[in-house]
Structures are given as structure tokens and as C-alpha cells.
Amino acid sequence: EQRGCFHRLHIMSLLWLQVSACEQRDCFHRLHIMCLLWLLVSDCEQRGCFHQLHIMSLL
């Protein structure tokens, strides 16, 4: 379970780097969404709420 969440955190880190580049192109809306998803992943690491994370990834 922890490995799965760390894998997702790694993916989110890569996405965050993409968003950082995106921030320079003024797409703050996407940055905001990614921040919310990252917080959700951090919360997921503590609770193991992979189902909720999956649902959010579909939105």
C-alpha cells in the first residue's frame, strides 16, 4: 500500500515539474488543480484512500 502511494507521489512530482514550466506560460488554473491533487495524494498516503484518488484523477 505504501509503495503504491509513493509511486503516485513520484508521478505527482513529475507532474508538478510540468506545472512549474506551465506556470511561466500563465496557466495558473492547471497549477491550482495540480496543487489540490498533490494535497489529496499526501492525504492518501496517510489514509490509504486510493479509491478517492482514482476518482479525482478521472475529473
Image: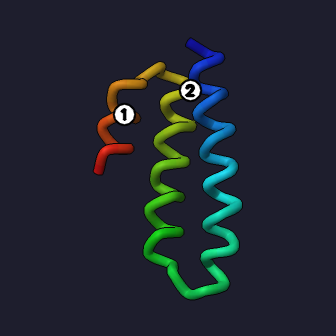
10 shown above or below 44: below
Helix, strand, or loop for circle 1?
helix
Using the image as rendered, state which of residue 18 and residue 5 is in the foreground. 18
In which image quadrant can residue 17 be found?
bottom right
Residue 48 spot, x, y in % from top left = 47, 19
- Residue type indicated by callout 1: His
The residue under the point 44% across, 62% down is 33
Q: Quadrant of the N terminus?
A: top right
- Residue 45 numbered tag: 2
Q: Are marks 2 and 1 in contact (CB under 8 Å)?
A: no
Q: Is residue 11 left or right of residue 54?
A: right
Using the image as rendered, state which of residue 35 and residue 54 is in the foreground. 54
33 shown above or below 29: above
- Residue type indicated by callout 2: Glu
Point out the tag, 2 or 1, that comes first from the N-terminus.
Answer: 2
Helix, strand, or loop for circle 2?
helix
C-alpha gap between disc 2 and disc 1: 13 Å
Q: Which residue is mark 1?
A: 54
The residue under the point 61% across, 67% down is 19
Residue 54 spot, x, y in % from top left = 36, 34
